[in-house]
Image (spheres, rainbow, N blue to C red):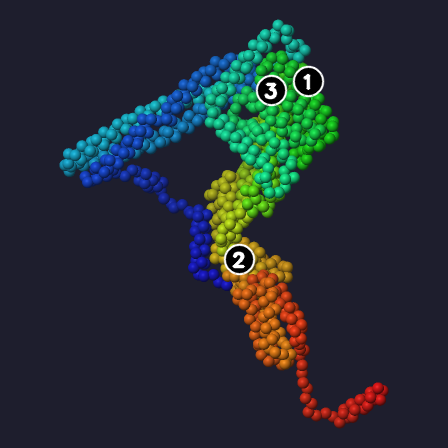
C-alpha cells in the first residue's frame, strides 16, 4: 500500500519546516554599526504627507471626530479622579497609623502587636500598589494619545504649508486652521492630565517610601522577637498577679483594644468591599447548590449510598458558611489579625453544627471541648492583650487542652475510630506531638517565657482547630462532588455514567491532597516556621548542577518533572473527555476521532516539553549543538526512525489503516490495536501482538479487509451424490444461510451449481457478513448446511473409484476359487 506522492511531499515539507523552526539559524556576520543603522531606519517615523485639497473636508471631519473622543476621555478621567480622591484617604490612614500608640513604642511591642501593625502597613502598601498600577496603565494610554496628536499636528502643519504654496481655496485653509486649533487645544488638555498624573505618581512614591521604611523596621523587630523566643520576657506568673486595684486598668485596656479592633475592621471592610462582595456571592452560590442537591427525587439510584452526606444536606447554610470562611484565607491573604480572629470565632458555630455528626460518636465531646477552648482563647487574644489576665487565661486554656488531649489519646476508640489512611496517620502523629508541646507551653508561661508560651499554645490549639475546619470543609466538598455526580444532568455524560466510581475516588483524593496543604501552610505559619522553611527550600532548590556547558538548578529539575507530569495528566484527561463525551456525540467517520485524539495528545505533550524546558531554566541556545548533532545522526543512523515517524503522520492523517481494522501483511492476519507515531501494534488471531514499524505499513503491500466497510464475502462448498435434484440442493443452501443472524440480506446470499465432479455434484454458496468473527460465521453456516442436507436425506458421498481389470494370472484364479470353496464348506 503506497501513499500518494502528494501526501509524501506534504509531510516531508512539514517535517523540514518543523526542523527549521527548532534548529536555530546561524547568525549572519553583520557589522554592529550597520545593524544599528538598519534598526534606526526601520524605527524612524515616515515623513508626513500633505493632504490633497479634495480630501481636506473629509479628513478634517474624521480628525475632529477623533479629537472629540480624545477630549471626552481627557476631560472626564475617572482613573485619575478616583486616585486623586483616594490619595488623601491613604495619606490620612498612613498618618493615623503613625499616630497610633502602638507605633510610638515599637521596640517594646509584643510579637502579636508587631504582626498586627505589619498587616496594617501591608494593606496600605497594597492600596498604593493598586494605585501605581492604575496610573501606569493610564500613563501608557495618555502617551499613546499624545503620539497620535503629534502625528496629526505634523500632517496638518505640512498640509497648511502646502496650501499656502499652492494657493488652496480660502475655505480649505480655514478648515485646516480650525483643525490645527482643535489639535492644539486637545494637546494642551492632554498635557495638563499628564502633569496631574506625574504629580499623583510623585505623591504615591512619597507615600510608598514611608510605608517601605516602616515595614522594614517592623520586619526587623519581628526578626529580633523570633530570635528571643527562648528569652524570659516577664517575671514568673506567681509574681505577676495584679492586685484588685488593677481591674480598672485591665478594663481600660480591653476598651482600648476593642476600639482599635473595630477601627481596623472598618478600614479593612472599606478597602476590600469588592472582595467581600465576591466572597458573599460565592457563599450564596454554594448555599443554593447545596439546597438543590438536598432535594429528594433528583437522583435516579443509590439513595442508600448518599446517607453519609445527609447531615451536610440537612444543614446547607452551615456547610456553605464553613467553606466561605475557609476560602477567606485565600481571598484575603493580607487580612489583619483582628479580622482573622473574628473569622475564627464565626467559624466555631458551623463547625459545631457539622463536625459532631461527621466523626465517630466517641469523638463528639472532644469536638465541643475544642470549640469552647477556641472561643475562650480567641476572646483572650482579642481583648486581653498585654495583660496579666491574658497570661492566666492562656495557662487555663493550655491546661484544659492538655488534659482533653491526654484523655482523648488514652481512649483507644477515640484515638483511632475516625483516623484512616495517610491522613489518619498524620493526625495521630500530630496529636502525639501536641501533648509535649502544650506541656512545654504551660511550664514556659509559669516561668515567664510568655512569648514562647503564647506561640506554642496558639499554634497547637489553632492547628487542631484548622484541622477540624479543613476536615469538615473537605467533607462538604466531597459530598457536593459525590452528589453532583449522581444528578440526572451528570448522568447524561458518558464519562460519569461509565466511570462514576473512578471519578469519586479521584476527586476525593484531590480534595484530601488540597486539604492537607490547607492545614499544613497555616500550621507552619502559626509556629513561625513557614518563612524559615521557604528560605531553606529556596536555597536548596537554587543549587546548581553543571555538566559541561549545561547548568541547571535542582529547582529547575523539579519544575521540569512537575511540568511533564502535569502535561501527561492533562493529555490523559483531554483524551478521556474526548473519547467518552465529545466524539460519541459527533458524526465522525471511523478512525477520525482516534486520529484527532492522537494529534492532540502529541501536541499537548510537545507543548508541555517546551514549557518544562522553560521552567527548568534551560536556554534554547544550549540546544544548538544538540540540534546539529541530531541532524548528522538523522543523515547517517536515524533514517529508519525518521521514515517511521513520517509514515506515522501519514497513517494519522491519510488513515489508510485505522484502529480496529483487520489487516493482512505477509503471512500474518490480525486486528490493528494501536497506531503510534513510530510503530503500530497488530493483534493476530493466534493471540500474539506484533509490533510493526509504520514504514512497513506504508511501503509494503497491506491488505485491509475493513478499510471502507466491514462487509466480507464467505464461500461454503459442498458435494452431493449423483442422482440428487440440484434445484433442491440450492434451495436448501439458500434457506440455511438466510436464517443465520450474522448473514446479510443485502447483498443477498447466492447459490451456485459448480459442475459435475468425479464422485459428486459440486455446489457453493456465497454469503456476506460484517462480523469480525467471520471464521465463526462460516463454521456455523457449514454445520447448518450439513445438518439440513442430512435431514433432507441427501447424501454427501465419499470419493469413489471404478477398477477395470484387463488380464489376470490363472494360478491366482485357482487359488481364489479354492479359498471360496473352503469358506463355503465351513459355513
Please give the residue where the numbered disc 3 appears in the rendered image: 378
Q: CA distance from mark 1 to mark 3?
A: 21 Å
Sequence-first tag of 3 and 2 = 3
Please give the residue where the numbered disc 1 appears in the rendered image: 443
Q: Mark 3 packing: few (<14 Cα in 10 Å), some, or many (20+)?
A: some
Judged from this view, the residue extending furthest toward the bottom is 810
Quadrant in which the C terminus is drawn: bottom right
The reply to whether discs 1 and 3 touch (Cβ–Cβ < 8 Å) is no
Q: Kindly tell me whether residue 721 is visible in this rendering.
A: yes
Which percent across, then down, holds residue 370? 65, 24
Q: Kindly tell me whether residue 786 is visible in this rendering.
A: no
Would you identify the image quadrant in which residue 111 lies?
A: top right
Q: CA distance from mark 1 to mark 2?
A: 76 Å
Judged from this view, the residue extending furthest toward the front is 297
Would you identify the image quadrant in which residue 459 lies?
A: top right
Sequence-first tag of 1 and 3 = 3
Q: CA distance from mark 3 to mark 2?
A: 67 Å
Would you identify the image quadrant in which residue 469 lies?
A: top right
Which percent across, then down, holds residue 203? 39, 21
Please give the residue where the numbered disc 2 appears in the rendered image: 658
Q: Left of 563 or right of it: where is 188?
A: left
Q: Mark 2 packing: few (<14 Cα in 10 Å), some, or many (20+)?
A: many
Judged from this view, the residue extending furthest toward the top is 245
Instruction: Tell us which disc is closer to us: 1 or 2.
Output: 2
Amino acid at each position: 500500500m503506497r501513499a500518494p506522492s502528494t501526501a509524501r511531499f506534504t509531510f516531508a515539507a512539514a517535517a523540514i519546516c518543523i526542523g527549521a523552526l527548532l534548529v536555530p539559524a546561524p547568525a549572519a556576520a553583520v557589522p554592529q554599526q550597520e545593524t544599528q543603522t538598519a534598526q534606526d531606519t526601520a524605527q524612524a517615523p515616515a515623513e508626513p504627507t500633505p493632504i490633497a485639497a479634495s480630501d481636506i473636508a473629509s479628513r478634517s471631519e474624521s480628525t475632529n471626530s477623533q479629537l472629540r473622543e480624545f477630549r471626552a476621555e481627557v476631560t472626564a478621567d475617572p482613573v485619575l479622579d478616583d486616585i486623586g480622591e483616594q490619595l488623601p484617604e491613604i495619606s490620612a490612614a498612613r498618618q493615623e497609623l503613625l499616630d497610633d500608640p502602638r507605633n510610638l513604642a515599637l521596640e517594646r511591642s509584643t510579637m502579636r502587636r508587631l504582626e498586627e501593625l505589619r498587616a496594617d502597613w501591608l494593606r496600605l502598601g497594597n492600596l498604593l500598589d493598586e494605585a501605581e498600577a492604575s496610573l501606569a496603565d493610564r500613563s501608557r494610554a495618555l502617551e499613546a494619545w499624545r503620539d497620535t496628536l503629534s502625528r496629526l499636528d505634523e500632517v496638518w502643519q505640512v498640509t497648511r504649508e502646502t496650501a499656502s504654496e499652492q494657493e488652496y481655496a480660502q475655505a480649505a485653509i480655514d478648515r485646516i486652521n480650525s483643525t490645527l486649533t482643535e489639535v492644539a487645544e486637545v494637546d494642551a488638555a492632554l498635557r495638563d492630565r499628564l502633569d496631574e498624573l506625574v504629580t499623583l505618581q510623585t505623591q504615591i512614591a512619597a507615600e510608598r517610601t514611608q510605608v517601605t521604611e516602616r515595614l522594614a523596621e517592623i520586619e526587623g523587630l519581628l526578626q529580633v522577637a523570633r530570635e528571643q523566643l527562648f528569652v524570659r520576657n516577664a517575671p514568673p506568673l506567681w509574681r505577676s498577679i495584679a492586685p484588685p486595684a488593677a481591674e480598672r486598668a485591665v478594663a481600660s485596656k480591653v476598651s482600648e483594644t476593642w476600639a482599635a479592633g473595630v477601627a481596623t475592621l472598618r478600614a479593612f471592610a472599606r478597602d476590600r468591599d469588592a472582595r467581600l462582595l465576591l466572597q458573599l456571592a460565592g457563599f450564596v452560590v454554594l448555599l443554593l447548590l447545596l439546597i438543590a442537591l438536598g432535594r429528594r427525587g433528583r437522583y435516579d439510584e443509590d439513595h442508600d449510598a448518599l446517607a453519609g452526606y445527609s447531615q451536610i444536606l440537612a444543614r446547607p447554610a452551615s456547610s456553605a458558611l464553613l467553606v466561605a470562611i475557609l476560602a477567606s484565607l485565600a481571598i484575603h491573604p493580607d487580612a489583619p489579625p483582628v479580622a482573622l480572629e473574628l473569622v475564627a470565632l464565626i467559624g466555631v458555630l458551623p463547625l459545631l453544627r457539622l463536625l459532631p455528626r461527621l466523626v465517630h460518636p466517641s469523638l463528639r465531646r472532644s469536638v465541643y471541648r475544642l470549640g469552647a477552648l477556641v472561643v475562650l482563647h480567641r476572646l483572650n487574644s482579642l481583648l486581653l492583650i498585654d495583660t496579666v489576665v491574658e497570661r492566666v487565661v492562656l495557662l487555663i486554656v493550655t491546661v484544659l487542652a492538655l488534659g482533653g488531649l491526654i484523655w482523648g489519646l488514652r481512649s483507644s476508640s477515640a484515638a483511632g475510630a475516625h483516623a484512616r489512611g495517610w491522613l489518619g496517620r498524620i493526625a495521630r502523629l500530630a496529636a502525639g506531638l501536641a501533648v509535649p508541646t502544650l506541656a512545654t507551653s504551660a511550664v514556659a508561661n509559669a516561668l515567664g517565657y510568655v512569648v514562647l508560651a503564647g506561640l506554642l499554645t496558639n499554634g497547637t490549639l489553632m492547628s487542631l482547630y484548622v484541622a477540624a475546619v479543613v476536615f469538615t470543609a473537605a467533607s462538604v466538598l466531597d459530598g457536593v462532588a459525590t452528589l453532583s455526580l449522581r444528578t440526572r444532568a451528570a448522568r447524561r455524560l458518558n464519562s460519569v455514567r461509565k466511570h462514576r466510581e473512578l471519578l469519586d475516588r479521584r476527586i476525593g483524593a484531590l480534595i484530601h491532597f488540597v486539604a492537607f496543604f490547607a492545614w499544613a501552610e497555616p500550621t507552619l505559619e502559626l509556629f513561625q516556621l513557614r518563612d524559615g522553611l521557604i528560605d531553606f527550600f529556596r536555597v536548596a532548590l537554587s543549587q546548581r548542577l553543571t555538566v559541561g556547558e549545561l547548568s541547571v538548578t535542582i529547582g529547575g529539575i523539579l519544575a521540569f518533572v512537575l511540568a511533564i507530569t502535569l502535561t501527561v495528566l492533562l493529555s490523559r484527561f483531554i483524551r478521556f473527555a474526548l473519547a467518552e463525551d465529545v466524539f460519541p456525540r459527533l458524526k465522525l467517520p471511523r478512525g477520525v476521532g482516534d486520529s484527532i485524539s492522537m494529534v492532540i495528545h502529541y501536541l499537548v505533550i510537545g507543548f508541555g516539553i517546551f514549557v518544562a524546558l522553560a521552567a527548568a531554566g534551560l536556554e534554547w541556545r544550549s540546544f544548538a549543538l544538540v540540534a546539529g548533532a541530531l541532524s548528522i545522526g538523522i543523515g547517517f543512523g536515524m533514517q529508519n526512525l525518521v521514515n517511521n515517524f513520517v509514515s506515522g503522520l501519514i497513517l494519522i492523517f491519510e488513515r489508510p489503516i485505522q484502529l480496529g481494522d483487520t489487516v493482512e501483511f505477509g503471512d500474518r492476519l490480525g486486528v490493528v490495536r494501536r497506531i503510534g507515531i513510530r510503530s503500530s501494534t497488530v493483534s493476530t488471531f493466534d493471540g500474539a501482538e506484533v509490533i510493526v514499524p509504520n514504514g512497513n505499513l506504508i511501503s509494503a503491500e497491506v491488505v485491509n479487509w475493513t478499510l471502507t466497510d466491514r462487509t466480507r464475502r464467505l464461500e461454503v462448498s459442498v458435494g452431493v451424490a449423483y442422482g440428487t435434484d440440484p434445484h433442491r440442493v440450492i434451495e436448501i443452501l439458500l434457506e440455511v444461510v438466510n436464517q443465520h443472524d450474522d448473514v446479510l440480506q443485502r447483498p443477498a446470499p447466492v447459490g451456485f451449481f459448480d459442475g459435475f465432479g468425479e464422485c459428486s455434484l459440486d455446489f457453493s454458496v456465497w454469503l456476506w457478513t460484517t462480523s469480525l468473527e467471520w471464521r465463526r460465521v462460516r463454521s456455523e453456516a457449514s454445520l447448518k448446511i450439513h445438518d439440513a442436507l442430512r435431514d433432507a436425506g441427501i447424501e454427501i458421498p465419499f470419493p469413489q473409484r471404478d477398477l477395470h481389470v484387463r488380464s489376470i494370472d490363472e494360478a491366482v484364479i485357482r487359488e481364489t476359487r479354492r479359498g471360496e470353496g473352503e469358506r463355503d464348506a465351513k459355513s
